[in-house]
Amino acid sequence: MSMGNMRLINSSADPQEVMNFATKVCKNDFYLGASFLSKNSKEYRFKCVKAEDNEVLTPIPGTVIPTGGATPTPAAVNKS
């Protein structure tokens, strides 16, 4: 489902896989990346963000937003 820059992903996959997928989909649509909005059961809501929107990309809690380089493992992420 797509409503402009909003995305709804229904998935039972690992949250990091969902975050990676959402980021890839948004980048394929010429956005900067995906910003997590909410989760309800297996439904994840994201907003695709453009660079000029001056918005922060928010990952699913406990995950990281993948970049062009190597994606750090969750153990390497500072959760403070």
Image (cartoon, rainbow, N blue to C red):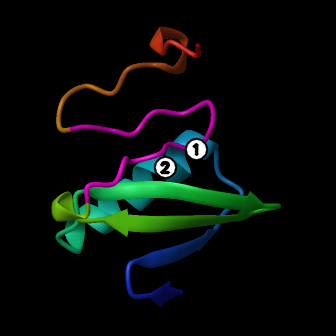
Residue 7 is left or right of residue 42, and the answer is left
Amino acid marked by disc 1: Ile
Disc on the earlier residue, 1 or 2: 2
> Mark on residue 60?
1
Of 35 and 16, nearer the camera is 35
Residue 53 place in picture, x, y as percent: 25, 64
Residue 80 place in picture, x, y as percent: 58, 13
Report the residue at 23% width, 74% height from top: 29
User: Does 66 sit above or below residue 69?
Assistant: below
Report the residue at 58% width, 16% height from top: 79
Report the residue at 18% width, 29% height from top: 69
User: Does 54 sit above or below residue 78?
Assistant: below
Residue 51 is left or right of residue 57, and the answer is left
Q: Magenta stretch?
A: 54-67
Which of the 4 quarters of the picture holds residue 67? top left
Residue 20 place in picture, x, y as percent: 42, 48
> Mark on residue 23?
none
The residue that mark 2 highlights is 19
What secondary structure is the magenta-colored segment mainly? loop
